[in-house]
């Protein structure tokens, strides 16, 4: 036994062939892995079954074809062939245990029929039900051969009648279960949606109504709400959990809220946060806050570009501009919060400003 | 010359807003609120520009383009959306839209974008530039280097658009003419529409575009 305790396969476990660890094709190793048992156990089972008319060998080949390798999916045709082989192996094994043909074949037909009809849709369903019916008839027929032809016919008729009575009932039961389940799921989704809308949109709308006199405040509220909803509806495709992307979005949202100036944020890629990445986020936040406070622009553009070797952030406004060289030495913002921070993190900060506006360019090499 | 514009958006309120913002600068000849309404209307009116919402109740904006463009090659489409989902936007662009602007665009910028679209130029908002840079992420080997890789210049232009630069400012900064900048942007658009680069295909497939 491995160190893992044995897990009961309550739901069908997901078996994958462990090609690298197997002796032949990794079937037993894979089964062992998914059940949490030593691969010797399934190996022994297959070996023993091989004595039952060769069932173990057929089953092994079937499993080999049907079970996907750990990397990549199997071709569907191959899979189908695998399942057929597995069924054949089951039949051989059952026969080996002394079950008679009159039990095995009807059983196999019924099983195949149920599998086919599982979806309860279209031609497959009809074929499935027919197979089940055929199985039942065959079973009744064979068991009744001793009693003569009339009896066989009678019992077949009884079986078909039973099927006609019970079939629709079983169908309806299954259908009801399905509707109930989808209904429940839909209700849950609806409740979650309602909670979300209540916490966000409705609150914001209430605030907007109260403060409808203050245009700037209303715009800020709408903007924040939009940001929030978007983040929920369209989660970032590259998001790596607590990464640069979400940190810079939070920073932009904070600046918007504090200073009431919208920040148009565009970004590509993402990297996980570490101390250096945090430094560039904080520097960018300061640059955005400066632009919002001093430039007089009615919008700030921020572009975050995560390249192969470098992270670059550009914060641009179309405000009045200033002379970076003429800043008083006491201007803590640019000197310390932007330049100093970037230098300590091993990056650079460049500030260009003219009458057309200001741009702060932050660059940081990515960790090797 | 006033451009003839058809407005396709399922929100009446938003259409009213756009109408008043565009004002006298363009002539709004028709409006539609769904794919089913828009297709016959555009065929009939044959406008210069269609302002097209990315999301419509009976399919995306790309469905409108797919049904109209083969018969009316002269009609140009400009996507207009609040949507932030890259896959929706790229789908409309790949279907043949000449550009994408967000609904928060100012009236004068929108008029400018309509004019540009009518002239056959590409209209890239900063956000679209970001999406495209993402889609053409460097690294994977190209299948068709002509189509599947952005040139250094094209990348530079896109990065400047993403940074919030206007075409004129980009031209000054890169020492190019505005016309050349427009040519680069159009080339990017063409690559996006024709490219079958593995990376882009995979990128699109992951987001269930194709």
Image (cartoon, rainbow, N blue to C red):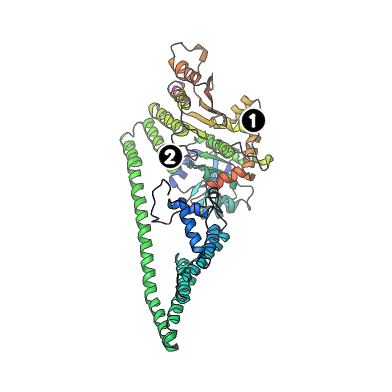
B12 with respect to A309 (left or right): left
- Magenta residue check for A214: no
Instruction: Please state the horizontal and vertical placement of residue A90, each as a whole percent of the image.
Output: 48, 66
Residue closer to the observer: A154 or A253 = A154
Q: Of helix, strand and loop, which one carries label 1?
A: helix
Instruction: Tell me which segment is drawn in magenta.
Output: A289-294
Residue at horizontal 35%, vertical 60%? A180
Q: CA distance from mark 2 to mark 1?
A: 35 Å
Instruction: Please state the horizontal and vertical placement of residue B185, each as a whole percent of the image.
Output: 62, 36
In the drawing, what numbered circle is on residue A231?
2
Please say if B125 is above or below B205: above
Residue closer to the observer: A304 or A137 = A137
Q: Chain ID for label 2?
A: A
Query: In this rendering, do the residues under marks 2 and 1 share a single chain?
Result: no
Q: Is residue B49 visible?
A: no
Report which residue position mark 1 lands on. Answer: B178
Residue closer to the observer: B38 or A368 = A368
Residue closer to the observer: A10 or A161 = A10
């Amino acid at each position: 036994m491995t160190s893992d305790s044995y897990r009961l396969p309550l739901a069908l476990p997901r078996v994958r062939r462990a090609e690298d660890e197997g002796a032949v094709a990794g079937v037993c190793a894979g089964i062992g892995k998914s059940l949490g048992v030593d691969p010797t156990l399934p190996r022994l089972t297959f070996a023993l079954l091989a004595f039952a008319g060769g069932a173990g060998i057929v089953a092994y080949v079937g499993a080999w074809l049907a079970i996907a390798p750990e990397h990549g999916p199997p071709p569907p045709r191959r899979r189908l062939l695998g399942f057929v082989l597995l069924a054949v192996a089951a039949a051989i094994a059952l026969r080996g245990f002394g079950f008679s043909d009159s039990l095995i074949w009807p059983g196999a037909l019924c099983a195949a029929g149920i599998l086919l009809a599982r979806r309860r849709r279209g031609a497959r369903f009809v074929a499935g039900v027919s197979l089940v019916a055929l199985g039942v008839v065959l079973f009744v027929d064979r068991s009744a051969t001793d009693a003569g032809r009339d009896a066989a016919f009678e019992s077949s008729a009884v079986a078909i009648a039973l099927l006609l009575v019970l079939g629709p009932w079983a169908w309806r039961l299954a259908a009801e279960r399905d509707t109930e389940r989808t209904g429940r799921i839909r209700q849950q989704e609806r409740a979650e949606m309602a909670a979300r809308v209540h916490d966000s949109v409705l609150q914001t709308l209430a605030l907007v109504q109260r403060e409808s006199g203050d245009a700037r405040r209303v715009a800020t509220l709408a903007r924040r709400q939009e940001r929030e909803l978007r983040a929920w509806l369209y989660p970032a495709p590259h998001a790596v959990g607590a990464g640069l992307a979400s940190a810079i979005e939070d920073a932009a949202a904070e600046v918007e809220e504090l200073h009431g100036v919208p920040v148009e944020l565009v970004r590509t890629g993402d990297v996980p946060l570490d101390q250096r990445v945090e430094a560039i986020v904080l520097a960018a936040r300061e640059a955005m806050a400066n632009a919002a406070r001093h430039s007089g622009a009615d919008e700030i553009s921020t572009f975050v570009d995560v390249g192969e070797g470098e992270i670059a952030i550009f914060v641009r406004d179309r405000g009045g501009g200033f002379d970076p060289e003429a800043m008083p030495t006491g201007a803590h913002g640019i000197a310390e919060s932007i330049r100093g921070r970037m230098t300590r993190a091993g990056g650079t900060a460049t500030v260009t400003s003219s009458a057309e506006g200001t741009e702060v360019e932050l660059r940081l090499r990515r960790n090797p | 010359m006033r451009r003839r514009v058809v407005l396709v958006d399922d929100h009446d309120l938003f259409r009213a807003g756009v109408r008043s913002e565009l004002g006298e600068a363009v002539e709004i000849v028709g409006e539609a609120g769904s794919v089913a309404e828009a297709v016959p209307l555009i065929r009939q009116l044959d406008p210069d520009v269609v302002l097209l919402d990315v999301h419509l109740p009976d399919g995306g904006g790309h469905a409108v383009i797919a049904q109209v463009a083969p018969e009316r090659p002269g009609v140009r489409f400009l996507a207009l959306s609040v949507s932030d989902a890259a896959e929706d936007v790229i789908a409309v662009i790949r279907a043949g839209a000449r550009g994408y602007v967000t609904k928060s665009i100012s009236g004068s910028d929108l008029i400018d974008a309509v004019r540009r679209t009518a002239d056959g130029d590409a209209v890239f908002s900063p956000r679209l530039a970001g999406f495209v840079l993402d889609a053409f992420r460097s690294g994977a080997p190209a299948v068709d280097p002509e189509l599947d890789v952005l040139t250094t210049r094209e990348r530079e232009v896109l990065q400047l658009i993403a940074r919030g630069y206007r075409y004129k400012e980009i031209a000054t900064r890169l020492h190019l003419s505005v016309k050349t900048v427009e040519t680069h942007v159009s080339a990017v658009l063409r690559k996006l529409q024709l490219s079958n680069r593995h990376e882009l295909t995979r990128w699109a497939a992951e987001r269930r575009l194709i």
